[in-house]
Amino acid sequence: MSGHSKFANIKHKKERNDAKKGKIFTIIGREIAVAVKEGGPDPANNFKLSTVIAKAKAANMPNDTIERGIKKAAGDNGGASYEYMTYEGYGPGGTAIIVKTLTDNKNRTAADVRSAFTKGGGSIGTPGCVSFMFDEKGQIIIDKEECEMDPDDLMMIALDAGADDFAEEDDSFEILTAPDALPEVVSKLEAEGIKMESSEVTMIPQNYVSVTDEKQAGQIQKILDLLDDSDDVQDVFHNWEEAE
């Protein structure tokens, strides 16, 4: 979670993705199953499915794995029933944390999330207690080492495709979109042969909280690590900026 504040979320998740690629594929597989059951197997007519497919491709999930997941979900009427649940709470140092889960056992998931917050010195809050501090956006991250295109050209392609904003950092490019515009922008970038490090609908903090106390920083990291260990947790968003 070190680094430029805007990339705190994505860098945290990238580290997790690199270490637990198998788990990420399992998580995305669940999301595909739920999206197909809710809106059908055609991504052209199912926004949620098209968004999950964009996320799967950015995570380097093979196309045949994606297609198998869609076909299986389309023909599966008796599988496990998963449900999205969101938890909001506070970490040490005045930090805000949002936890998005996909579970077939709400009691188990609630206990896991509550335990993570408690063990890290945080607390679960009521729905909406911290989400107003975040903006929901489509976010695309491109690794500079994987992109030889001139930044200005990349920016114009992204903006012409419907992106809202483009930012350049030391090692990455960040493209922000409206949530419902993400699949179209991803499709246009793919058509240009641009490799994406990640692509998903995310929650971006309006402001970040720098925690200078080492004990508190360690507690926040403990919360995040425990949440990562839960198979039911899909995403964790926070406004913690690690002190320099």
Image: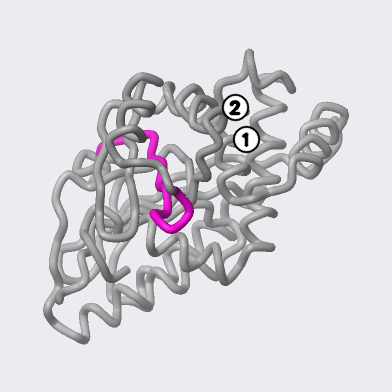
| Residue 63 spot, x, y in % from top left | 75, 40
Viewed as shown, does residue 144 lie left or right of 122? Answer: right
Q: Which residue is mark 1?
A: 53
Please indicate whether residue 201 sits to the left or right of residue 195 in the image.
left
Element type where label 1 sits in the image: helix
Please report contact status of discs 2 and 1: CB closer than 8 Å, yes or no. Answer: yes
Q: Where is residue 67? Give x, y as percent.
A: 79, 35
Residue 165 rendering spot, x and y as whole percentages: 25, 32
- Name the secondary structure under disc 2: helix
Direction bottom: furthest residue: 215
Which amino acid type is shown beneath numbered disc 2?
Answer: Ser
Q: From the viewer's perspective, is 169 left or right of 16?
A: left
What residue is disc 2 on?
A: 50
The part of the image, by quadrant, that contains residue 116 is bottom left
Whole-percent x, y for residue 6 in the image: 24, 53
192 lies above or below 148: above
Check residue 236 for magenta coloring. no
In the picture shown, does residue 74 fall above or below 42? below
The crowd level at tag 2 (other Cα within 10 Å; few <14, some 14-19, many 20+) is many
Q: Which residues are magenta?
A: 135-147
Residue 221's quadrant in the figure? bottom left
Vertical placement of 122 versus 40: above or below? below
User: Residue 79 or 235: which is nearer the viewer?
Assistant: 235
What residue appears at the point 64 percent right and 30 percent down from the top-left corner? 35
What amino acid does circle 1 point to? Ile
Identify which residue is drawn at 25% across, 61% down.
Answer: 90
User: Can you tell which mark lies on residue 235?
Assistant: none
Q: How is the image coloured?
A: one colour
